[in-house]
Image (spheres, coloured by chain):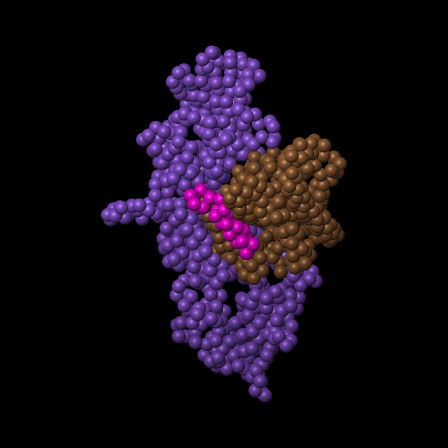
Chain colours: A purple, B brown
Amino acid sequence: MAREDSRKSRRSEQGRGETGSQSLSSADDRQAPQRSSATLPALGAKGMALFLWRQLTSMQTALLLLMLLAIAAIPGSVYPQRNVNAQITEAYIAEHGRTAEIMDAVGLFDVFSSPWFSAIYLLLFVSLVGCVIPRLLVHLRQIRSRPPRTPARLTRFTGYTRVELPSADADAIAEQARRTLRRGRYRTDALEEGAGARSVTAERGYLRETGNLIFHVALLGVLVGVAGGGLTQYRGQITVIEGAGFSNSLTQYDSFESGAWYKPGELPPFQFTLDEFRAEFDTTPNEHRFGQPLLFEADVTATSPETGTFAQTLRVNEPLHIGGQSMFLLGNGYAPEITVRDPEGNVVAQGPIITIPSGDMGYTSALVLKAPDAKPQQMAVVGFFLPTGVIDEKGPHSQFPALIDPQLALTVYTGDLGLDEGIPQNAYQIDVSSLTPVTDASGTQSLLRLAPGQQADLPDGSSVSFDGVRRYAAFDIKHDPFQVFTLISALSAAGGLILSLFIPRRRVWVRATPLAGGGAVLEVAGLARSDDDALEGDVRALAEKLGAPPAAPPTARPEAPSEASAQVPSTPSRPADPAPPAAPGTTREGPTQ
Amino acid sequence: MINQQLAEFSNLLIILTVVLYVLALIGFGADLSGVSQRRSDARLRSREAARVPVGAGAPAIGAGGGAEAGAGGGSFAADDDERASALESRDSGPAADGIADGRGAEGDARPAGALTARGFGFVMAAIGAVLHVGAMVLRGIATQRVPWGNMYEFSMTSSAMIVVVFLLFAIRRKDLRLLGTFVILPVLVLMLIAQTAWILPAAELTPSLQNSYWVVIHVGIAIIATALSGLGALIAVLQLVQARHERTLAAQHAAGETRPQAWGRAGAVLSRLPGATALEALCFRIHALAFVCWTFTLIFGAVWANDAWGRYWNWDPKEVWTFVIWVVYACYLHARATRGFRGSKAAWFALAGFACVVINYTVVNLWINGLHSYSGL
């Protein structure tokens, strides 16, 4: 944004204080040669530090860091990221071997927490602070001070208009100019110049710089909010089967992560029961539409000390807010109810088993059931749950995600499940390499295929029965005390941005010089300090208004210079001495906005 | 739920829109080549006039101005005017530099009130835009939701947005209508790709897009931002080309050439366009709006993500790329305020930003899996 502009304006303000030649310094705001750092003499340690600081806070450095930030973020979208999906990342590394290990070492799988990415954005924010603080001080000073003096020669400024008014009074014109500009929300100052001349200097658009500063400070606020959230938040994943309940304690979570400043035991008390989970899928016979989800809904009955008991339906985009936490419906799947009997006839597992969808359209779901209590050997049941099952050359898979033809395709193993060694295991995974598959008399592995209500008896005397299907829902529960602060910061940044981009900062000067034979000469001109198409028109309108008061006849403009009479289309409207190129306010017909 | 008849009608309107845009393209294209043709004709005449012996030539030219109803002399004068202004950044051309003015200045013996090629192109584009918007509204009514639930609908809606924004700009600034070719052509290409490769039957939204007004706000602003980025990139390209053209003319002028001219017909077209300085100002204006829209796309996206996924920022590929777009456009705005980067160098940042928009729209949608996988393909 206009960081550089105001830095220069600071210099110009200082220059004004030293030399008093404010007309030159303000006119050359945008193009005056600045002091160059190329001819620096030998620097001491302090000088060197100052030099480095100036370099870091310079616009070119900020530009470079911004560009680096953009480039550095790209690998984060190309390679899998641990903080987004650790499983996919590990699989990618395992697949790509040595190359991936080197990439991992340089942080390509943790781009957004890598030292180089952090270095870039931290330097950027340091640069930002170094730029914003001096500008803030300058701006505060400017807001309290009067607008700079009227330049001695106005001819070279935008929209310069000169009108001779034979029957006008310089004082009256100046007073009217001041009132008009005040009404136009200009900050004005009336000056008495030599030989009875009066001038009014006016400036408007301080909000532009204010907005610019708000934008940059608010970006810092966003950074603080994100960092604060990272330190104090917690989030966890839970899985609840229809009809089952959840009560908020750490042991109930499948996974739980928290920031460094989170104190264990801060979980607010609440419970809920998942009464029903509904899902609908598209049956349109189109390759892109068939099987696409149309609806996910979870009916819960929740209880907390503050709210009592209430029922709510959770959907995607409609989380449950309870006890300062939010609970989001993020996943779902099937939990077939299975009963397993060991060869001795004892029930060693019974109830709904959570299965993991493999990610295909039809919800082909992996099932793992461990029965450590089975005798004579521990048992494991491994296979698939298929909502709409077929078994063909591709193996068992499901053709549609809804329960059209639910089936189980299972194999049974016996052996030591390794659960007694005290090493925590993933309940949804099992390594069958050390287990023995149950085989029939001919020695081939028994493949069980069950529909609801069916039971399969295995050669070794054990049995598996498929009693029914329930659904389950997966929720994320999270708490981030900084998120409101972050949002307010982001919105402030956007607001400041709008001010800084669309409020024009401009100066307007009016000078009235008495004529020897009575009357006065009116001169009006402006200076755009930002892109400001309307300036020229406004300056001319002001000249028109001041030049044609009831006291003075409107025909009293005989000697107006050609550029002031902007009615003839073929006349170039720019002054003989073109204004600085970066001030397109000199165009008469600018873009229409 | 889905009114398939209305959806069919919407598809039909899209086809009609494509036809109208093709007609508009023909009109705008004929206008462009006409401008360059008339220009080279005028130049030829001026060369011949210069070759006439001095004694007989002086009165002949003087008479020609009046007797030929401004045919030769008129365009001659216009030539001088334009070239003079071209040398000084040419932002001082009259506002009504549109059809009427162009016709008058070029001095073609065309009856008043007849439709010029440019006028034809503009009218066709305007009717096409009405049908285009109508098609998207019908798609919305047919599906009872906003018409931007997948990549096809997003493309169709944002291309409608581009045309509408361009036409709105061009209603008041008639000189911009000369750019019609450069707007309608990319829009047509985008529409044809969407119509052939990304088209999907009208359907309901996936659950993650349901139950949230943010789909209207977040995606709506993203569409506006995309359209503004596209238009901004077009202006940035023209600005770069125009700046180079002006440098060439200025170099010729400095070398003593009294009538500098470069680049043949393309140069003649460029001479009719606003100068590099005016284009730069327009470029900034569009990108300032685009940057604000991208900012709100990010913020509202974060608010929605917080409701939908429980995290306001996930480093999802779409988010990463939108962040990259935002940072690159921030670079553009900063570069514009930095000494040594103003003008052409800054425009390259704007083009880099648009390249990121294109990547975010194609590569990320089609080949990178993420939470924003709504292309439906």
Instruction: From the viewer's side, name the closer residue of A589 and B190.
Output: A589
The residue at the point 64 percent across, 70 percent down is A389
Q: Is residue B341 magenta?
A: yes
Q: Describe residue A7's horizontal placement relative to residue B325 as left or right.
A: left
How many marks overall?
Answer: 0
Instruction: From the viewer's side, name the closer residue of B329 and A436.
Output: B329
Instruction: Identify the residue at the far bottom of this view.
Output: A442
Which secondary structure type mostly characterizes the magenta part of the structure? helix
Residue A314 in percent (x, y) is at 56, 53
Above or below, B232 against A503 in this view is below
Residue A62 in percent (x, y) is at 40, 48
Q: Describe residue A448's horizontal placement relative to residue A232 as left or right.
A: right
| Residue A398 visible from this viewpoint | yes
Residue A415 in percent (x, y) is at 47, 80
Above or below, A96 against A71 in this view is below
The residue at the point 57 percent across, 72 percent down is A384
The residue at the point 54 percent across, 78 percent down is A412
Above or below, B88 against B153 in this view is above
Instruction: Identify the residue at the far left of this view.
Output: A44
Q: Quadrant of residue A97?
A: bottom left
| Residue A491 visible from this viewpoint | no
Q: Quadrant of the C terminus of chain A?
A: top right
Q: Is residue B356 magenta?
A: yes
The residue at the point 53 percent across, 44 percent down is B252
Instruction: From the viewer's side, name the closer residue of B100 and A467.
Output: B100
Q: Quadrant of residue A145?
A: top left
Q: Quadrant of the N terminus of chain A?
A: top left
Q: Where are the magenta residues, as a range?
A: B336-359
Residue B3 in percent (x, y) is at 72, 51
